Amino acid sequence: MSLRRLGFLSAALLTATALTACSAEPVEADDPKPSATGTTTAPSGAPGGAPDKGALSLADAIRKIPVAEEKRTGYERDSFKHWVDEDDDSCPTRQEVLIAEAVTAPEQGDRCTLSGGSWLSYYDEAEVTDAKRLDIDHMVPLAEAWDSGAHDWTPERREAYANDLDAERSLVAVTAKTNRSKADRDPAQWMPPAQSAACTYLVDWTATKLRWNLSADETEQAALLELAEPCAESTVEYEPAS
C-alpha cells in the first residue's frame, strides 16, 4: 500500500504542475482535526487530452455529484469514530496513512510509535521530517460529509468513511497548518496554497464525493466547475464504497 500511495502522489503532483486555481482567504477553523475496494486516482489522461478508458473528465465527474442543500443540524465530530485499528496490528488509521505516504519510511516501535521518516505535504509542497507536524486530513471533512449526506448514515458507515484506507486519497498526510486552515470548508471557500496542488485536490475531492455518494450544494458545484477550468487534462476514477 505504501508504494501505491507514494507512486500516486508523485504522479499526481507532476500532473498538477503549472496549473493554477484561486484560493479563499483563510478564516478561523471551526472543525480542526488532529493531526473504494480499489483506488481513487488522478491520471493525466490519454494523449491529446482525452480521458483514459474508464475515467471521467474532471468537469464531467463534478457534474455527476448529486446537487442538494446541505444539512448541518445535529453534527458532532464524535458521530464519526475515527483513528481505529481495523486490522488489529497496533497501527490505528493515522499511523497507517503516515506509513503509507512516507517518502522515507519511519521506524516503527511498540504500539506503532513512529520515529524518523520524511513526508511531502502536497497542499503546500512542504517537506516534513517530524510526524508530529502532520495531520491526517479527511479529503472531504467530516462536517462537510455530514452536511452532504452522512447525517442519514448508520454509525458503522460513518466509521468506515472516517477510516477509509481502501481509497488512496480519502485520507492524506499534510501539514497541520494547512489542514487547520482548511477546517471543514469546501473548495468554494478554501483551496490548497500550492498552485501545483489545485487540480490534484479537485480530483481528490470530486472522487471522494462520488465514492461515498455525497452531494454538493449549488455554490460548491459552481465553484468546482470554475476552478476545474485549467484542469482540462485531469481525469477522475473512483469505485463506490461498499
Image (cartoon, grey):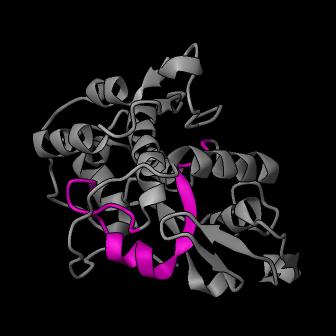
What residue do we see at 64% from left, 32% from top?
37
Is 139 located above or below residue 46 in the figure?
A: below
Front one among 217 and 149: 217
Magenta includes 168? yes
In the image: residue 228, left or right of residue 71 = right
In the image: residue 140, left or right of residue 200 = left
Q: Which quadrant of the rendered structure holds the C terminus? A: top right
What residue do we see at 19% from left, 45% from top?
223
Q: Quadrant of the rendered structure where residue 45 is?
A: top right
In the image: residue 224, left or right of residue 233 = left
What residue do we see at 40% from left, 32% from top?
210
Q: Is residue 32 visible?
A: no
Residue 111 percent across, percent down from the top left: 81, 78
Q: How many marks?
A: 0
Residue 138 percent across, percent down from the top left: 46, 59
Q: Is residue 223 visible?
A: yes
Q: Residue furthest top?
A: 53
Front one among 72 and 234: 234
- Which segment is the magenta one? 167-193
Is 110 located above or below residue 238 in the figure?
A: below
Q: Quadrant of the rendered structure where residue 195 is?
A: bottom left
What residue do we see at 47% from left, 56% from top?
197
In the image: residue 157, left or right of residue 143 = right
Residue 179 percent across, percent down from the top left: 43, 73
Magenta includes 224? no
